[in-house]
Amino acid sequence: MSADNMTLTLKIWRQRNATVKGSFETHTIKGVTSHMSFLEMLDVLNEQIIHAKGQPVAFEHDCREGICGTCSLVINGFPHGPQQYTTTCQLHMRHFKDGETITIEPWRSSAFPIVKDLVVNRDSFDRIIQAGGFVSINTGQAQDGNDIAIEKDQANHAMDAATCIGCGACVAACPNASAMLFTGAKVSHLAQLPQGQVEASQRALRMVEQHDAEGFGRCSNITACEAECPKGISVEHIARLNREYIAATVGSTK
Amino acid sequence: MNSWIARFLTSSIGKKVVMSLTGLFLISFLAVHLAGNLQLIGSLDGGQAFNEYAYFMTNNPLIKFTSYGLYAGILLHAIQGILLWRKNIAARGTVRYAVKNDRVASATKSSIYMGSLGTVILIFIIVHMVQFWAQMHFTSNVGDVTYAGAEYAVKDLYTLVKGAYTNIWFVIFYVVSMIFISFHLLHGFESAFQTLGLNHPKWSPLIKTIGRAYAVLVPLGFAIIPILMYIENQQS
Ligand code: HEM
Ligand code: SF4
Ligand code: FES
C-alpha cells in the first residue's frame, strides 16, 4: 500500500468552453491519502484552488458509487483510470504512488464536445436511446413476476448487457471513437427479452442510424471498449447488434 | 425503391459487412494462390508444372470470371478500407489525447493499425501485379514454351519469377510484405466473423485458433518461396 501522505503532480486539461482552445495546467497536491477516491482527491484540489482564488476544475460526478455513469476522465491514458472494471468515482488513490505525475483529460470524441475543462456533452448517447432504446408497451397493472417465462441463461445475458451505465468510456477508449459497445449493449439487452421482441428490428435499424448520424466512428472490432468498460461489457453484444441489424435489413419490411 | 439496400451499404454495419466479405474472399484466394505457387520451389521439371498451372489459371473461363471478381474485391476492400480509416480518424476529434494507453480485450493490437497495414499491402499488390501479372499479359517480355506432347504453347512465367528472385531486394520486399499481411490477418480473420455477427461461445475459440494459424502459416508459405528460389539461383 502507498504512503498515506502522498504528494502528487496533476496535469489537468483546462478549457473555458467548447469554442476556445484548451491546454494543460499543472498543480501540486499534498496530503493525499490512499483511502481517498480519485474524485475526493479532485475535491481537495478544488478547495486548494478556491483558497488561492482560482477557478475550480469542472468535472462530472453524481452517485459516486459506480452506478450512474456520470463520472468520466481519462487518467494516465486510461478511461476511468488504470484499474479495470472500475469507474473513476470508485478508483482509489492506493493505485497511485507518492510523487507520481497524473495526466487527466476529458473523453475525446467529436460526438462528445467539451463543455468545460473535463466535462463533455454526452447528449449524443441520449439521442441514440431516444431512437429506439426503449420498449413501448402499455404495462397496465404490474404483472406477476413469473408471468413471462425467460430462460435463466438468457436472462443472465440480457442483464449483462443491461449493466451498461452509459458512461461513454467505450467511446473514449476506442481508437475510432465508435459507440458500438454502448449501442450494442442497449440493443442486445432488449433483443434478449420477450418484451423487447415487438420492436426488435426497428430498434436495431434506428439506433444504428442515429449512432452513425452522431459522427461516432465505425467499429473495427478492436475491443479496447471491452477492456476499458467499467462494467466489463463484452463485444459479444456488438456481434448480436450486427446480427440484429443484418436480420432487420433482410427480414423486416422496413 | 431500393432504398433499404442503399441504407444498408451506407450504414456503419453495412460497410463493415462489405469489408468482411471482401476480406474473406481475399483470404480464400490467398490459400488457392499459395497452393499453386508452392509448385515454384524445388522444381525438377524446369517449371513445367507451374507454367501449365499458370496457363490453366489464366485461360479457364470460370477462373477468369472469378479473377475479375477478385480485382473488384481488392479495389472495393482497399477503397472502402481507406475511407473508413479516414472517417474514424475524424471521429476522434481535432484534439488528440496527450497520453493514451491502448489496452484491448482481444489477443492482438493489429486491429488498431489495419489502415496502415492495408496501405502497405496495397503498395505490395501494385508492385506485385506490375512485376508479374502485367508483364505476362501486356508485354512480350515473357517467352513461350511448348512442352513435349502439348498441343499449344504456354507462357514461361517460371523463368520470369526465377529471374526476379535473383535480386535480393525483391526477396526482402516480398518477405517484409508477408509480415504485414500476417499482422493484417492476425486481426482480420477473426474480425471478419465478428462483423457478420458470428460470435458464439462454442465455435468462436475455434475460429480464433484457425485464424491465427492461417495468419502465420499462409504468409510464411509465401515468404519461403522467394527465399528458396534465391538460394537455388545462388547454387546454379
Ligand atoms: C491480401 C489482401 C488482404 C486481405 C486478405 C485482407 C483481409 C481483411 C480482413 C479479413 C479484414 C477484416 C474485416 C472485418 O473486420 O470485418 C480486413 C480489414 C481491413 N482491411 Fe484488409 N485485407 C487485405 C488487403 C487490404 C488492403 C490492400 C487494404 C487497403 C488499404 C486493406 C485495408 C483494410 C482495413 C482498413 C481494414 C479494417 C476495416 C475496419 O474494420 O474498419 N486491406 N482485411
Ligand atoms: S458499454 Fe461500458 S463503457 Fe460503454 S457506456 Fe456502457 S458502461 Fe460505459
Ligand atoms: S459518479 Fe456515478 S458512476 Fe461514478
Image (cartoon, rainbow, N blue to C red):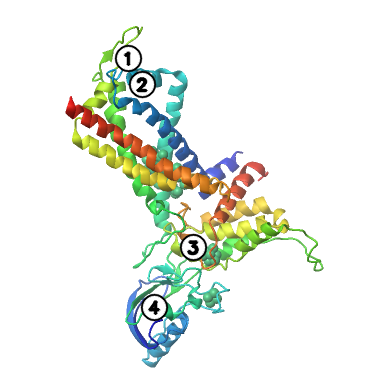
Q: Are marks 4 and 1 on the same chain?
A: no
**Residue type at tag 4:** Phe
Q: Nearer the viewer, residue A93 or A196?
A: A93
* Residue receiving disc 2: B54
Q: Gap between marks 4 and 2, in whole Å?
A: 63 Å
| Image disc number at residue A96 | 4
- Label 3 beta carbon less than 8 Å to ligand 2: yes
Q: Return the x and y of residue A112 as percentages of the image width and height.
A: 47, 66
Q: Return the x and y of residue A108 as percentages of the image width and height.
A: 42, 66
Q: Nearer the viewer, mark 1 or mark 3?
A: 1
Residue drawn at x 34%, y 19% is B49
The secondary structure type at the circle numbered 2 is helix
Image mark 2: chain:
B
Q: Nearer the viewer, residue B49 or A60?
A: B49
Q: Gap between marks 4 and 1, in whole Å?
A: 71 Å
Is residue B170 in sight in this rendering?
yes
* Residue receiving disc 3: A170
Q: Return the x and y of residue B129 as percentages of the image width and height.
A: 31, 31
Residue drawn at x 47%, y 21% is B62
The secondary structure type at the circle numbered 1 is strand
- Label 4 beta carbon less than 8 Å to ligand 3: no
Task: Tell me which image quadrant ligand 1 sits in.
Answer: top left
Residue drawn at x 61%, y 51% is A205
Q: Return the x and y of residue A229 as percentages of the image width and height.
A: 50, 65
Residue A217 to residue A94: above or below: above
Q: Dot 3: within a 10 Å radius of its alpha carbon, few (fewer than 14), some, or many (20 or more) residues? A: many
**Residue type at tag 2:** Ala
The secondary structure type at the circle numbered 3 is helix
Q: Residue furthest bottom?
A: A51
Q: Gap between marks 1 and 3, in whole Å?
A: 57 Å
